[in-house]
Amino acid sequence: MPQSPHDRAAEYHNKAAHAHQAAATAHGKGDHLTAHELSKQAHEHSTKAFEHSKEAAAQFKAGKQL
């Protein structure tokens, strides 16, 4: 069964949180280049989560079952 937009949004929120945490760890170790890349990745995951959240909201508004 394919994932619903809500499930995909939750997945990307979790991925973003993990990337943020990894970036903070890298930054704390002085690895600023890795921290920057992980922060960029976290931003991309957050953007995808937002898009899937909008899709889920639109489906809900249209009366579709998630």
Image (cartoon, rainbow, N blue to C red):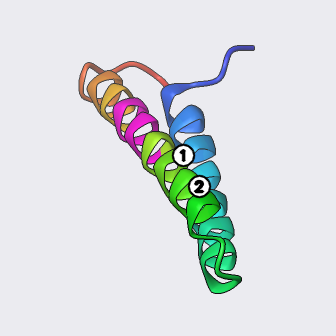
Q: Nearer the viewer, residue 37 or 46?
A: 37
Q: What residue is at 63 percent from the left and 50 percent from the top? A: 15
Q: Is residue 50 left or right of residue 28?
A: left
Location of mark 2 (residue): 38
Q: Nearer the viewer, residue 62 or 47?
A: 47
Q: Residues within 10 Å of mark 1 (few under 14, many from 20)?
A: some
Quadrant housing residue 55:
top left
> Taking 42 as reference, is 7 above or below it?
above
The kind of residue tagged 1 is Gln
Q: Residues within 10 Å of mark 2 (few under 14, many from 20)?
A: many
Q: Nearer the viewer, residue 63 or 2?
A: 2
The disc at residue 20 is none
Q: What residue is at 60 percent from the left and 77 percent from the top? A: 27
Compute the Cα span from label 1 to label 2. 5 Å
Q: Are marks 1 and 2 in contact (CB under 8 Å)?
A: yes
Mainly helix, strand or loop, the magenta region? Answer: helix
User: Over which residues does the magenta segment extend?
Assistant: 46-52
- Measuring from the top left, give residue 22's x and y in whole percent: 68, 67
The kind of residue tagged 2 is Leu
Location of mark 1 (residue): 41
- Regarding residue 13, the answer to whether it shows in the image is no
Quadrant housing residue 18:
bottom right
Tag 1 secondary structure? helix
Q: Is residue 38 magenta?
A: no
Q: What residue is at 24 percent from the left and 28 percent from the top? A: 61
